Amino acid sequence: MRGGALISGNPVAGPNLSVEETLKVLAVLRHSPHGEAAAVGAIGLIAAVIAVDRLATSPRQAAAVAFGLLVVAMLVLAVVLVPWRRLPAPHADRVAALADLPAEQVARGERLHAELRPSAYGGRAVTLAAAVGLGLTPAGTALVTWAGGVLGGSWVAQVLAGAVAIALLNQVFTLPFAAWAHTILVRHGLSTQTWRAWAIDGVKALALGLVLISIVLLGFYGAGRASPQWWWVWAAVFLTAVSVLLTFVFPVLIAPIFNKFTPLEPGPLRDRLLALAAADGVAVREVYVADASRRTRAVNAAVGGLGATRRIILFDNLLRPAEATQGSPTKDGEAAKAMSDELLRGATDDQIAVIVAHELAHAKYHDMASRTVLGAVRLTALMCGLYLLDGWTALLRLAGVDTLTDPRALGLFVVVLGAIGALLRPLGKLMSRRFESRADRHALDLTGDPASFEGAWRHVVEVNLADASPGRLRYLLSASHPSIVERIATARAYARQQGDSVTDAAADIPEAFAPLNSAVSGQGCR
Ligand SMILES: [Zn+2]
């Protein structure tokens, strides 16, 4: 969905879509691979243009109508694109799955995550305090004005220097909590990083973040200056284009900043994985191995990129466990050593096949494209909402500015976006879990190997020190994947059903869980 199109029917902006052109577009969409979703989107878009055209007498009214329509569009797309139906994970199976996991491993995972929580919450609390302090008081405005002044005082200087100043300030506040988390991960034997390697990672991430944020902010404030009435549309178009471009270039330009990727060595495993992809009808040219062991002992996999850059990535720890921690041994270094002794093997080839089958599902169902479409509409609604918020003078007065598109109000921009992001986060996580559940189901269908599926999760509990069964609230607020206990329970219920279906003649049971539509897609890991 293109935000720009929303305004084409408005008296203030560009040309109308003719009926003929509309029909032509619809005809093309009907034959595209994601025809259904695209057609729904196109119809929504046309309805939006007509509604805005009819109802709006001013840009502000048009934005209000557009916002309502965008929210409806988000809901419709969420219903259509997210695979809400999933395989059952019966309660009894979850209880049994948890009981069957080695108790000391489950306890170790819980302990690690309990120890990490104070640092995570502490980091978030200081970020929030800094954001509120800079965004809802004149302090942020003063900081950006000062920093911009150092570079000459233009709006570009204010955006760039302001972003650097705010990011560095946040970094200073959160650094102690990040360092604390690192010591915990090293003590538990999960991190393999020295302080030096950890610091280099942090500097790289900060530098990359600043480059990306600068691009985003220059686009946002540039739109604000170029079109005071319609900036939200141009900002949405620009930011959507940036996010699509990032998805494309991420595996080839950004991921290599942090990891080395090498093609999986020729051999039986590579042949098997490529054959699996071919059997699944997914075009995969290469399976890459990431040198994750330089950072962690954890295992993971991902499918990244779009189109020509799409690839499957395996953590090297799946193939061979990381060496013992290189970091300075602590008094708890014994724990790390004990753990490395347990990890004499990587995952089995069968387990890796199941993991890759999960990743193939993300490619097969185009989960990345679905998430991009959902993200684009959400972003457009967000920009539209910001435009409407821009009329709230009491809020603007807190920061001592007249408009959100004033670069000096960068702190306010951050706090408003942060608040909206926090509110939407649980819904985003819920949708993510549904995409992941479908990928799990696909892995079971494709490999027909629930035993190795369960084995893979057992391996993750052992190696990643995963929290196999997180508390309900934490799960709802922040879990992007089903819990491990849930995934094992699903595999067991699936195995039972498969057994039943042979005798029941209900051989099409997996069909009952076919995706709600054929039009979906996405990205994911694990
Ligand atoms: Zn996944």
Image (cartoon, rainbow, N blue to C red):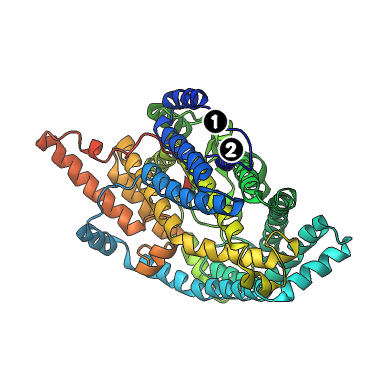
| Residue 524 pos. (x, y %) | 47, 46
Alpha-carbon span between mark 1 and mark 2? 8 Å
Indicate if the residue with disc 1 has its beta carbon within 8 Å of ligand 1: no
| Residue 184 pos. (x, y %) | 55, 71
Q: Nearer the viewer, residue 383 or 37?
A: 383
Where 363 falls versus 257 (above or below)? above
Q: Nearer the viewer, residue 5 or 97?
A: 5
The residue carrying mark 1 is: 17
Element marked by disc 1:
loop
The answer to which of marks 1 and 2 sits earlier in the sequence is 2
Q: Disc 1 vs disc 2: Cβ atoms closer than 8 Å?
A: yes
Looking at the rendered structure, the kind of residue marked 1 is: Leu
The residue carrying mark 2 is: 8
Residue 314 appears in the rendering: no
Task: Choose top left, top right, bottom left or bottom right for residue 504.
Answer: top left
Residue at (59% x, 65% y) in the render: 416
Looking at the rendered structure, the kind of residue marked 2 is: Ser
